[in-house]
Amino acid sequence: MSGMAGKEVKNDLLENHGRKVALSYIQRLSEAVGSVVQAKEEAWSYAPPKEDSQIATVGIGLDGTCMLMCEDGYREAMVGTVSLYDSEGERQHTIYLGLAEKS
């Protein structure tokens, strides 16, 4: 649901979960979560889990798309991945990073 507009979230909650929720509640909740994330963003860090097997290959991916931002119209959003693979080619872990272009 993180990529949906408020009205889409409202419809999804009703259709798929039988929950009638006010659009204003969804908007306030979204703003509250966003505020917490922004306040904590610089302090949070991520450490990959301990791996049971040796990492033989590191894969790096990058992609982007245009997203409709309410006030700013369409803007590009980027996503990157760093994947760790063992010698058999089995993915052991992936780190996902996302970023909206700064205006």
Image (cartoon, rainbow, N blue to C red):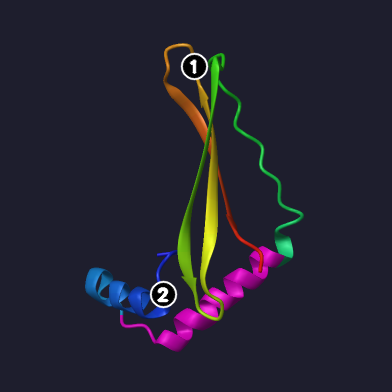
Disc 2 designates what residue? 5
* 93 or 70, nearer to the observer: 70
Q: Give the residue at x 60% y 75%.
A: 32
Disc 1 designates what residue? 86
Quarter-wise, where is residue 37 in the image?
A: bottom right
Asked if residue 22 lies left or right of residue 16, the reply is right
Give the mark toward the camera: 1 or 2: 2
Relative height, residue 95 to residue 90 (above, below): below
- Magenta stretch bounds: 20-38
Residue 92, percent from left and from top: 48, 26
Q: Earlier in the sequence, mark 1 or mark 2?
A: 2
Q: Give the residue at x 23% y 74%.
A: 15
Q: Give the residue at x 75% y 56%.
A: 42
* 81 or 51, nearer to the observer: 81
* 102 or 18, nearer to the observer: 102
Relative height, residue 12 to residue 93 (above, below): below
Indicate the amino acid at tag 2. Ala
Q: Residues within 10 Å of mark 1 (few under 14, many from 20)?
A: some
Q: How many marks?
A: 2
Residue 94, percent from left and from top: 51, 35
